[in-house]
Amino acid sequence: MLSLARRIADQQGGETAAVVLGHNLGDCAADLARFGADRVYLADDERLAAYATLPYTRVLADLVRAREPRLVLAGYTVMGRDLMPRVAARLGTGLFTDCTGLELDGTEPVFTRPIYAGKAFVRGMAASGPALATIRPNVFPVQPPDDGRTAAVEMVQVDLPPADLRVVVREVMRAVSARPELTEADIIVSGGRGIKGPENFKILEELADCLGAAVGASRAAVDAGWIEQRFQVGQTGKTVSPVLYIACGISGAIQHLAGMGSSKCIVAVNKDPEANIFKVADYGIVGDLFEVVPEMTAVCREMKAQG
Amino acid sequence: MNIAVLLKQTFDTEAKITLAAGGGIESAGVNLIINPYDEFALEEALRLKEKAGGEVTVIGAGGPRVAEALRTALATGADRAVHIEDPALAAADEYAVAEVLAAALRKGSYDLVLAGWRAVDDGSAQVAVRVAELLDLPQVNVVTALTVADGQASATMEIEGGGQRVEVPLPAVVTAQKGLNEPRYPSMKGIMQAKKKPMEHLALSDLGLDAAAVTPKTRPTCHFLPAGRSAGRVIEGETPEAVRELFRALRFEAKVV
């Protein structure tokens, strides 16, 4: 995101600032500078240690009002999608969600975002400033860091009325998983109806762990109760755009394709040579996934061993 | 307990998306449904009402066909519907829709506002959160479990890599994620009863708003369809050889592993 902001700022001759909220932030400014920030705002407060909608909205909206940036970017992550609409409403401005493109038309930013889960796209511009957008992870390239850059650091005053602390976190349930988050993973190994049962996701997990991949699923597998809903890829699940998407036993319903069609490379493993998924796959293997996937894991491990 | 459910009518998720001749997305001939995430919100509202009593009001903004979605919600068990329809809303964006929904909510008195966390059409996941801000209510987003007692809601929400349970005083805005419940279907009896249930039709002026108050803050410039993917290569051969060839191609052709 800093790389993206840097590119836009360079095209326009503007300044890029990073805003960091948290507690005991330490020295993050140097890293942010290397990736393109001219200025770093640090909001360091005990009450900002964990993300919470109302305190974060207060700090960010106040800062935007005071500094009047032309463009405000955040990741389309759990936090970004909770925070940014609230900030936009407080500022009385527009927001572009989950952007996959950002260019300038003259000096005005033009945002591209998927609609109908990627079955179509819309381009749009802000009717008034500032322009707010959340950016889809993994889409924009990261520029190599420049060790010669430094940033001015400014501390942000944090004033929170008691009403901002109305929501209280009672319990955090961490899913015990070393695997990457589905929407941010470079590689996803996904299973569908062809998996046949919850116990069989294990063979996908083994391949995923070898590849450093996340595990996903189609609606059929979720609706059958084989895997939790948060793993679902598709129009009523998550929209993903990994570098590599490996679809195992997934037929390729239109609502699933909508959720993963923007993947850079798609591999399909399916018994049915007529399955829809082969129409979008870069590489396909027609065969029994219970045979093919363990073989893939074996080859993957072999490749890893060879480096 | 009085609950409002924000309801959006969307294309069926199986709908094929095409461009209209004059720009924009073609809507002619497309099957319309209640946004699936809003169905989870409605179902949760009905369950809370069955436990604690009170009334469920469904509120939707948009053209004449939105009334069908609201009528379906009444048939499913909601008590009252509010349909906001005005020519000035034809180009409404998230900002504008939130303004009218917030205005409609101010006319009533609700302990809880439920909505889907996003709609399957524009997927912007903004309107419910904006409504919370406009009404100065706390929000709990992307919720998979909800209980309400003693003026407090306890909700489990999705966070990165897991979930967390939060407590929030009512009134509050809660958005529903798939998994919150299993929505019921309207019964024949429900469909008959729905015809007698009240549906209020409101224009902007009924909400104390004018066209200036719903001027969009964003301006779409064009719609387009993604470049179609074409079928690639099916790798033939016995499994061990095919898999080896696949990995060779992934490494040296696609350069992704």
Image: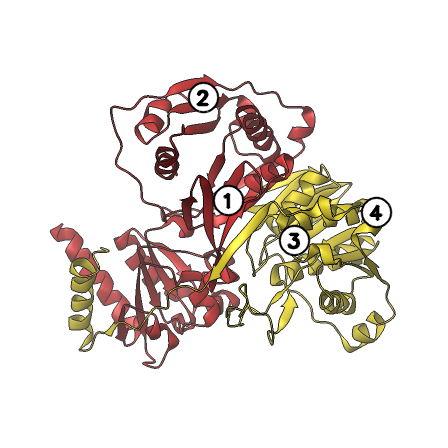
Q: Amino acid at mark 2?
A: Asn
Q: Position of residue A235 (x, y in %)?
A: 50, 63
The red chain is: A
Disc ID at residue B107 = 4
The yellow chain is: B
Q: Position of residue A156 (x, y in %)?
A: 51, 20
Same chain for mark 1 and mark 3? The answer is no
Q: Identify whether A45 is placed above or below A83.
A: above
Chain under callout 3: B
Residue wearing tag 2 = A24
User: Label 3 to label 4, Cα distance in Å?
Assistant: 21 Å
Could one spot residue A122 in this view of the protein?
A: yes
Q: Position of residue A99 (x, y in %)?
A: 46, 49
Q: Secondary structure at mark 4?
A: loop
Q: Residues within 10 Å of mark 4 (few under 14, many from 20)?
A: few
Taking the image as shown, residue A126 lies to the left or right of residue A302, namely right
Viewer-proximal residue among A297 and A11: A11
Residue wearing tag 1 = A78
Q: Identify whether B28 is placed above or below B164.
A: below
User: Label 4 to label 1, Cα distance in Å?
Assistant: 32 Å
User: Label 1 to label 3, Cα distance in Å?
Assistant: 26 Å
Residue wearing tag 3 = B92
Q: Position of residue A237 (x, y in %)?
A: 50, 59
Q: Amino acid at mark 1?
A: Val
Viewer-proximal residue among A123 and A20: A123
Q: Are marks 4 and 1 in contact (CB under 8 Å)?
A: no
Disc ID at residue B165 = none
